[in-house]
Image (cartoon, rainbow, N blue to C red):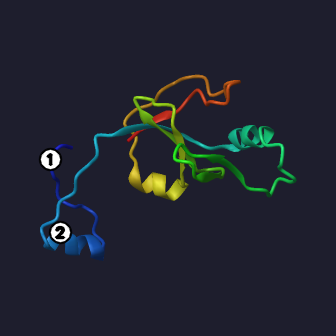
Amino acid sequence: ADHPIDIEIDLPPYRRLRELGFKEYRSKRQVLAIEVDKDDIEWFRSGMDHIDDDDDELSFFAPWGELMVVKEGDYLVMTYPPDNEVYRIEKNAFLNTYSQVGTVEMDLTPKKDGGLSRFFCRF
């Protein structure tokens, strides 16, 4: 929303913010996201020649140069409209921060160039 709304969460820190007159602003920003599943983990694993066993952490470099660990259940996210920058958000952080606004149906098969070809639309 482009205007403030009342804070609806009824936990002590939020109650205090409400009492002090704070309001909530909702972002208009949208992202494309996909929940990492077993097939995605296998895809990451297949591209990493230094993996010794199934317990080794899988990772990739985020656009800002940080090594991002990838775990099943986490989300890979790209801004919308797409800018080809993919990053990871931990599952609980994603589910508590983003809400679904639509779905984009495309082929989920990883592309040969290393990109994923389907994301669910969330903001």
Residue 98 screen position, x and y as percent = 40, 48
Q: Secondary structure at mark 2?
A: helix
- Amino acid type, callout 1: His
Q: Residues within 10 Å of mark 1 (few under 14, many from 20)?
A: few
Q: Quadrant of residue 19?
A: bottom left
Q: Secondary structure at mark 1?
A: loop
The residue lying furthest to the left in this view is 21
Q: Which residue is mark 2?
A: 18
Instruction: Tell me the CA gap for discs 1 and 2.
Output: 16 Å
Residue 21 screen position, x and y as percent = 12, 67
| 22 horizontally vs 32: left or right | left
Where is the N terminus found, in terms of image quarters?
top left
Give 6 or 76, whichever is nearer the viewer: 76
Vertical comparison of 72 with 107: above or below: below
- Amino acid type, callout 2: Arg
Q: Which residue is mark 1?
A: 3
- At x 62% / y 44%, what residue is drawn? 36
Residue 118 screen position, x and y as percent = 56, 29
| 93 horizontally vs 67: left or right | left
- At x 28% / y 64%, what residue is drawn? 9
